[in-house]
Amino acid sequence: MGKSLFIDLREKELHTYLFDSRGGSHTLRETSTYPVSGQYEFSLPDAVADTEYAYLSLPLSFLNFRVIELPFSDRDRIREVLPFELEGMILSGSDRVIFDNVVLGSAGRKFRVLAVYIEKDVLKKILDKLRSFGIDPVVITCLDLREKTRDFSLPDLLIPAGTEPQDRVEPAIEEMRKSLINLRRGEFSYTRDLEQSKKSLRLTAALTALLIIVLSATILLKIISARSEASAVKNSIRKEYKDLFPDDRNIVNELYQIKSRMKELREKEDVFVGVNPLDLLVKLSAIERQGIVLNEITEDRVNIVLKGEAQSLSDIQQIKDRLESILGDVTIADSKTSGRNTMLFTITAKEKRG
């Protein structure tokens, strides 16, 4: 629950109404009265400064009034045109006063508008005086004006109101809920909440910037760590590659070159997988090869090639016949005389399937 302070400034005295406020409800807590000397000389205790929001009511004698007719009733539009409408009516010029307005009623297509204004110098002195006590009113209105606009008569504005303070509490509550006028406009606009919002936004922006810096630093450290790990892995791969292929001196991309080696091995897989050279040698050792020398034996998954040297063509035929007992499709592919008066031969065969 917050506290709201309504300051009722009158010509000879100042009344304060302290409320306990929650939402749109205001409960009177205490009232106080202070003397006023001159137009702006008054004093307030420090205790009244401990409020969430303050409201100020000015006496009628501080304000000036004009009644004009306009073809529209929107108060925001009226505020825009008032300086031009009243330029010739204000001796000091419209740029030296603060305006607001009250729509009094309509006649035909015209609306009667009560223009309410106060000189900037007067308003500044009052606000400076209140700020010296730590008070910055959110609304500046006039309690007497609310009563007089109920049954408006321009001459009535010249008659000071004589209502007792206790009779002004309910009108004060009405003004806090929805003020009839508010002279805190232009250069005198209420900015405390705005400044607090700006401070909050600046703090949020600073914290966001700090968070971004921390996140950036964390990401940077992770990138550096990842690069270091990648470099270590690359060096490990290079070392393993050198151990596997010591003859390869031209190492450009270890991973690519390993993949290339693997591809070569896969291509040779069909040649070597399923070949049992030891079994072939055992079978060859079991046959008689007198006068026959085998110089080269080649075996893959399909063919067996035997190259050797014999004393005569008949010896070649004999070895062919003997090979047919352990191999299939045995054929003398080539035979010719060597320079040593022997016969060179090539025999092809295939593994005999059971």
Image: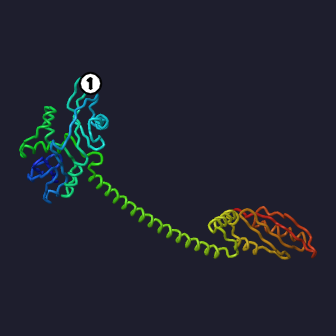
> Residue at position x 80%, y 74% from top?
288
Choose between 153 and 338: the one closer to the eye.
Answer: 153
Q: Is residue 205 left or right of residue 298?
A: left
Looking at the picture, how far across and down is residue 32, in whole percent?
A: 8, 53
Q: Can residue 160 be seen in the rendering of this structure? A: yes
Q: Is residue 102 left or right of residue 222?
A: left
Q: Is residue 282 above or below residue 274?
A: below
Residue most extreme to the front: 91
Looking at the picture, how far across and down is residue 210, in whole percent?
A: 39, 63
- Determine the image quadrant of residue 64: top left
> Residue at position x 22%, y 25% from top?
107
Choose between 353 and 240: the one closer to the eye.
Answer: 240
Q: Is residue 304 left or right of residue 182?
A: right
Q: Is residue 186 above or below residue 272?
A: above
Q: Which residue is mark 1?
A: 109
Report helix, strand or loop for mark 1: loop
Choose between 51 and 32: the one closer to the eye.
Answer: 32
- Determine the image quadrant of residue 335: bottom right
